[in-house]
Amino acid sequence: MARPVWAGVLSFGLVSLPVGLYTATDSHTIHFHQLQRGTSDRIRNRRVNERTGDEVDLSDIVKGYDAGDEYVLIEPEELDEIAPGRSQVLDIAGFVDLDDVDPIFFDKAYYLAPRGKEYGKVYGLLEQALDKAGKTGIATFVMRQREYLVAVKAEEGLLTCHTLHWADEIRDPRKEIGSLPGKARTSAKEVRMAEQLIDALSMPWKPEDFHDTFRDKVTALIEAKRSGASVEKAEPPAEPTGVVDLAEALRASVERARSPKDTREKADATAAGHHRKTQQRGAAAMKRIGAPGREDLHGLTKAELYKRATAAKVPGRSAMTHDQLVEALTEAATSAAAA
């Protein structure tokens, strides 16, 4: 069974509920050790005295605040003494509509559980009341010598606690990012097509449909290097859509999103063909590759070409450009036909 990371009392009005706080999420990040290059020797980080270079025992380390001309030393028990009650109480100040809390404020999620079966009724009462009211409790508490602002929510029969950023921790994007365009000039047609694309791509929220593919690739890389196998490189990122391309890219995207899966290749081909024509506007027409009657591979996107190249086991495909993939696939098809 999991152990609570914090235990105390959830207080709302004159009601007190002993609760435990449990971590709600896990990270499946692959962890690496630091080694000296050319060896299998681990790198160790040690706590050393900056002046003497001597290693310092953890029990001899204290917190110090840099006041300019000196350090003000603070002992752990002194931090506990200034808020003894706050470190044991999760105090709900009031209840707000969940929709009023901007998602940017949310940080980490925890589960709240009663510390004993005898408190189940009070716990269930708060959960049901929050659920029916559509409200979330805003509270503060101290954990590990730090005060937190939190939102207490009802979720499928239990209470969750989400730590929130303080208002002064949220950065102003207009001050932080110099490349924001402000109010962009767009045509009514472009806005309408963008809305159509959003509508066509709307879907129910099913988090289980999404998977950390990068972690799988890292695992595959590790296994490949262990066995001495070759590793395929990822495709380069897609080229940005130019202003001239925008309306046509939106139109083709809407067409593709609305098409059944078996006809989306045609829409992809249309979008890809327009993109290349825009890039080469003013230049000679593209040279067709392949024998008469053969499919024009130029009409496919690079992703589609790469998928075909993978199936055809074209060597070096991961580093090829769009046109190189077309040429390689054409040669592969010619060789297969002659065999």
Image (cartoon, rainbow, N blue to C red):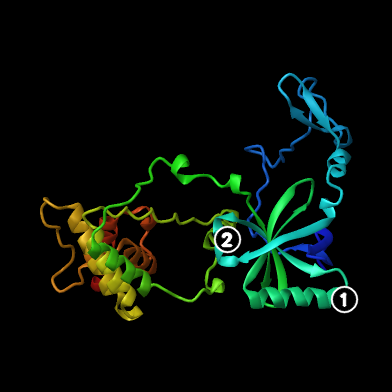
Relative vertical location of residue 331 with respect to residue 49 in this rendering, above or below: below
The relative height of residue 331 versus residue 256 in the rendered view (above or below) is above
Q: Residue 273 in the image: state x and y as whole percent.
A: 21, 63
Provide residue 152's location: percent of width, then percent of height: 69, 65
Q: Secondary structure under badge 2?
A: loop
3D distance between C-alphas at marks 2 and 1: 32 Å
Residue ID for mark 1: 117
Tell me the quarter of the image containing the C terminus.
Answer: bottom left
Task: Name the secondary structure under disc 1.
Answer: helix
- The x and y percentages for residue 291 are 15, 68
Residue bearing the label numbered 2: 101
Q: Single out the mark in the foreground, 2 or 1.
A: 2
Indicate left or right for 275 with 87 as reference: left
Q: Is residue 52 left or right of residue 289?
A: right
N-term mark: 2 or 1 = 2
Residue at image position (37%, 67%) is 307
Q: Is residue 289 toward the left or the right of residue 110 in the image?
A: left
User: Would you place residue 297 above or below residue 72 in this image?
Assistant: below
Identity of the amino acid at label 1? Lys
Residue 90, visible in the rendered structure:
yes
Image position, residue 199 (x, y; %) = 37, 73
User: What residue is drawn where x is 35% and y is 55%?
Assistant: 238
Q: Quadrant of the N terminus?
A: bottom right
Most foreground residue, 13 or 19: 13
Residue at horizontal 68 percent and vertical 46 percent from the top:
33
Q: Observer-nearest residue: 130 or 195? A: 130
